[in-house]
Image (tube, rainbow, N blue to C red):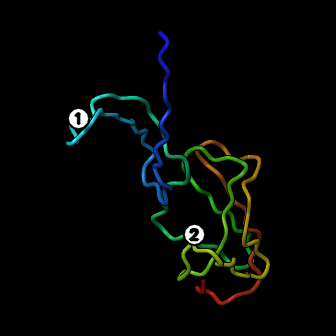
């Protein structure tokens, strides 16, 4: 009684990649000098986003290009875009590639579920086969 509680915020940084759909425990320790001293489970969280894609995504010229992504926690604020293979997705100043007939930046559609989202990139009409 009469005490005050304090809230501390810890910066877990920004995740860049997600390889699994597992849930994670958040463990706390009072002065942990070794890993086994994180003895208190204080919560559980999931890392939302798409699963890592192991095989290349390909579209055929003249046919509608739909990119399906699996993962967790998709929302209408999500989007995808096409950039050159040598460009890093998160680098400032990287612009989307111009592919005639295709939308190179596409937002989520209203039919996205929590674990699957299809991004309709439209229909490529011109380009060099195999080039990206």
Residue 8 in the image: state x and y as whole percent.
Answer: 47, 37
Q: Residue at x 67, y 55 (%)?
A: 118
Vertically, is 123 above or below 76?
A: below
- Front-lying residue, 30 or 113: 30
The relative height of residue 71 versus residue 8 in the rendered view (above or below) is: below
Quadrant including the C terminus: bottom right
Residue lying farthest to the bottom in this orientation:
128
Observer-nearest residue: 37 or 44? 37
Is residue 22 toward the left or the right of residue 95 in the image? left
Query: Which numbered disc, 1 or 2, marks the residue closer to the eye?
Result: 1
Q: Position of residue 33 (x, y in %)?
A: 21, 42
The residue that appears at 50% across and 21% down in the rendered structure is 4
- C-alpha distance separating marks 1 and 2: 36 Å
Q: Badge 1: how crowded within 10 Å, few (<14), some, or many (20+)? A: few
Residue 16 drawn at (x, y percent): 49, 60
The secondary element bearing badge 1 is classed as helix
Viewer-side residue, 61 vs 84? 84
Please tell me whether residue 39 is drawn above or below residue 116 in the rendered image: above
Q: Which residue lies at the image location 67% right of the left edge and 69% below the top edge?
A: 81
What mark, if any, has residue 118 been given in the picture? none
- Residue at the extreme top of the image, as rendered: 1
Dot 2 alpha-carbon crowd within 10 angstroms: few under 14, some 14 to 19, many 20 or more: few
Tell me which numbered mark, 1 or 2, is placed earlier along the sequence.
1
Instruction: Residue 88: give x, y in percent of width and height.
Output: 54, 75
Residue 90's label in the rendered image is: 2
Establish if 76 lies above or below 90.
above
The quadrant in which residue 92 appears is: bottom right
* Residue 86 as seen in the image, left or right of residue 98: left
| Mark 2: secondary structure | loop
Q: Which quadrant of the view contains residue 38? A: top left
Q: Badge 1 is on which residue? A: 37
């Amino acid at each position: 009684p009469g005490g005050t509680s304090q809230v501390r915020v810890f910066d877990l940084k920004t995740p860049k990649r997600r390889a699994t759909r597992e849930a994670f425990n958040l463990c706390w320790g009072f002065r942990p000098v070794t890993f086994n001293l994180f003895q208190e489970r204080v919560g559980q969280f999931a890392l939302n986003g798409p699963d890592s894609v192991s095989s290349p995504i390909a579209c055929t010229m003249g046919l509608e290009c739909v990119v399906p992504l699996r993962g967790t926690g998709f929302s209408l604020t999500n989007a995808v875009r096409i950039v050159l293979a040598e460009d890093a997705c998160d680098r400032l100043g990287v612009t989307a590639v111009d592919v005639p007939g295709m939308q190179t930046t596409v937002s989520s559609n209203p039919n996205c579920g929590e674990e699957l989202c299809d991004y309709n990139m439209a229909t490529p009409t011109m380009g060099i086969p195999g080039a990206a």
